[in-house]
Image: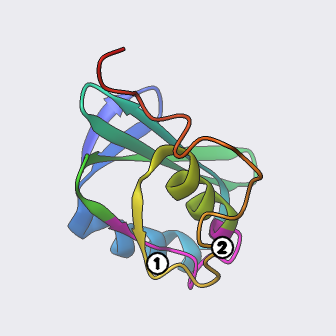
Amino acid sequence: MEDIGNNVVKIEQVELLPVIMEKKNDDWRLAQICCAFRDGHYEVSYSFAKGYELTNYRLIVGKDETVASISRVYKSAILYENEMRELFGLGVEHIKVDYHDKLYRIDAETPFMEKEGK
């Protein structure tokens, strides 16, 4: 883990599930998951809230890598994870309820992903 400022801690893939379990066991709620694609990689931010505290964990994921779903621990992650896959093309493994790219009615495949040549 690496504190990168502004209440954001950078984590590695192997740290994701232990961090998630720690937050769940300490009664933190999942506030949101945010995905962005920049500079050839994904930045996935997991935000947790407890009372008036907010903490964020950022995972850097290569374009062809996948992340493990946290939906078996936090059920609300189902929508975030389906959205990240459908809008950005991020590979998310083992989502508890997988909408198979049918969460949104959209014409374009992964519309929020940077298109090559643009």
Which circle marks residue 99 in the picture? 2
Residue 43 in the image: x percent, y percent?
38, 40
Image side of residue 90 versus residue 96, left or right: left
Judged from the image, the secondary structure of the residue bearing numbered disc 2 is loop
Name the amino acid, label 1.
Met
Q: Mark 1 vs mark 2: which is more N-terminal?
A: 1
Q: Is residue 5 above or below residue 12?
A: above
Quarter of the picture containing the C terminus is top left
| Residue depicted at 38% across the width and 27% down the height | 115
Image side of residue 57 versus residue 50, left or right: left
Q: Which residues are magenta?
A: 67-78
Q: Is residue 37 above or below residue 66?
A: above
**Which dot, 1 or 2, sits closer to the camera?**
2
Q: Is residue 26 above or below residue 38?
A: below
Cα gap from disc 1 to disc 2, whole angstroms = 25 Å
Q: Main secondary structure of the magenta part?
A: loop
Residue 30 in the image: x percent, y percent?
65, 61
Q: Is residue 101 above or below residue 43?
A: below
Q: Residue furthest front?
A: 107
- Circle 1 is placed at which residue position? 21
Kindly indicate the quadrant of the structure image that contains residue 52: top right
Residue 46 in the image: x percent, y percent?
51, 52
| Residue depicted at 41% across the width and 54% down the height | 90
| Residue depicted at 71% across the width and 46% down the height | 106
Name the amino acid, label 2.
Tyr
Kindly indicate the quadrant of the structure image that contains residue 81: bottom right
Q: Residue furthest top?
A: 118
Judged from the image, the secondary structure of the residue bearing numbered disc 1 is helix
| Residue depicted at 45% across the width and 35% down the height | 113
Scheme of colours in the image: rainbow
Answer whether residue 25 is magenta in the image: no
